[in-house]
Image (spheres, rainbow, N blue to C red):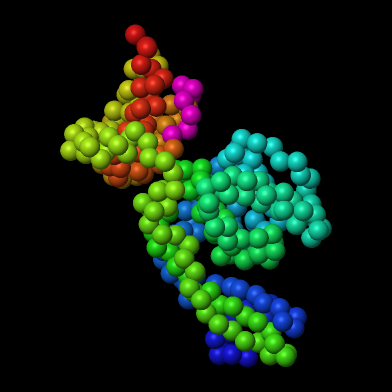
């Protein structure tokens, strides 16, 4: 037994001859940026699946059998996969995973992405593979989340040879920079506008506390918003987030799609996020007299 395996759970070292298993080094799991990445992805999944009444608490334990991944992809892509709803056997679970991952591959392959997961790695509860999959899905569907940049983990690779366990360490990059990750997509009109007139966009800061957004929705939909539903003079970050979130709810009630921006992005003066929200309002209400 190598000293490097001292902190590895015994269950992870019960290997057959020549079998290999990978796991995240325990110290990497304690890294704040890694923890943030896991939390952001967990919150995103639960937000997407809220109407399905599915609550994911642990990525590797809740996603390995393909059930949650199926629901997540169906919700994100607006499709229905031809798979059995409930599968208890390992064979059935892997068949479901195969179908789900083939659908994912069909979405991502045209963009030339390197796919760093497999049926066996996902079903084997390989957290690194699951995170690679989720990050790719979040980027492809432009999830309204902010992934922490430059998240790298140390991965322990354990092999069994001649009855002995041998281990090695490799670095695995889970995220790069936001610019590089979002660079996979075509630039849109907002990027061009932001490039050419960033100094003229400070006006959108007036919407950062959510008050104008709430009042604007009332004007556009022709109703009075009761003052007890939002903070007219918000003083804290949480109160501003509450206001923007409430404005987003009013937008949904008005028939708009859910904004891709997060309320936190608007409060944090993310100009592109705010512009996209305002543009959605403009396109819907531009002909309203």
Image vertical order of residue 49 relative to residue 20, above or below: above
Left or right of residue 263: residue 73: right
Residue range (magenta): 253-259
Image vertical order of residue 260 relative to residue 146, above or below: above
Of 210 and 260, nearer the camera is 260
Location of the N terminus (image quadrant): bottom right
**Where in the figure is residue 228, as x and y percent of width and height?**
36, 29
**Where in the figure is residue 249, as x and y percent of width and height?**
45, 30
Image vertical order of residue 200 relative to residue 183, above or below: above
The image quarter containing residue 219 is: top left
Q: Is residue 258 visible?
A: yes
Left or right of residue 152: residue 264: left
Q: Is residue 224 visible?
A: no
Of 114 and 147, nearer the camera is 114
Q: Residue furthest left?
A: 199
Q: Is residue 162 magenta?
A: no
**Where in the figure is residue 280, as x and y percent of width and height?**
39, 27
**Where in the figure is residue 245, as x and y percent of width and height?**
41, 36
Location of the C terminus (image quadrant): top left
Q: Residue at x 17, y 38 (%)?
A: 199
Of 217 and 165, nearer the camera is 165
| Most common SS among magenta residues | loop
Left or right of residue 256: residue 188: left
Q: Residue at x 42, y 52 (%)?
A: 181
Of 196 and 202, nearer the camera is 196
Q: Residue at x 61, y 35 (%)?
A: 78
């Amino acid at each position: 037994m190598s000293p490097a395996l001292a902190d590895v759970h015994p269950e992870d070292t019960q290997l057959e001859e020549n079998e290999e298993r990978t796991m995240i080094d325990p110290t990497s799991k304690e890294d704040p940026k890694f923890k943030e990445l896991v939390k952001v992805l967990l919150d995103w999944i639960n937000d997407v699946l809220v109407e399905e009444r599915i609550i994911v608490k642990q990525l590797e334990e809740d996603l390995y059998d393909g059930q949650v991944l199926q629901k997540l992809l169906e919700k994100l892509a607006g499709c229905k996969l031809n798979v059995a709803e409930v599968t208890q056997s390992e064979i059935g679970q892997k068949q479901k995973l195969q179908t789900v991952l083939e659908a994912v591959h069909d979405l991502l392959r045209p963009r030339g992405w390197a796919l760093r997961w497999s049926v066996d790695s996902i079903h084997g509860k390989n957290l690194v593979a699951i995170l690679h999959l989720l990050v790719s899905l979040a980027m492809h569907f432009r999830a309204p989340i902010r992934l922490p940049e430059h998240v790298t983990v140390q991965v322990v690779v354990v092999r069994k040879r001649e009855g002995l366990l041998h281990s090695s360490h490799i670095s695995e990059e889970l995220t790069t920079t936001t610019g590089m990750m979002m660079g996979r997509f075509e630039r849109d009109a907002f990027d061009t506008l932001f490039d050419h007139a960033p100094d003229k966009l400070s006006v959108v800061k007036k919407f950062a506390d959510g008050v104008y957004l709430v009042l604007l929705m009332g004007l556009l939909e022709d109703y009075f918003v009761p003052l007890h539903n939002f903070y007219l003079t918000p003083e804290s970050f949480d109160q501003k987030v509450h206001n923007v979130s409430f404005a987003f709810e009013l937008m949904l009630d008005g028939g708009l799609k859910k904004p891709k921006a997060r309320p936190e992005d608007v409060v944090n003066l993310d100009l592109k996020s705010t512009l996209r929200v305002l543009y959605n309002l403009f396109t819907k209400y531009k002909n309203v007299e």
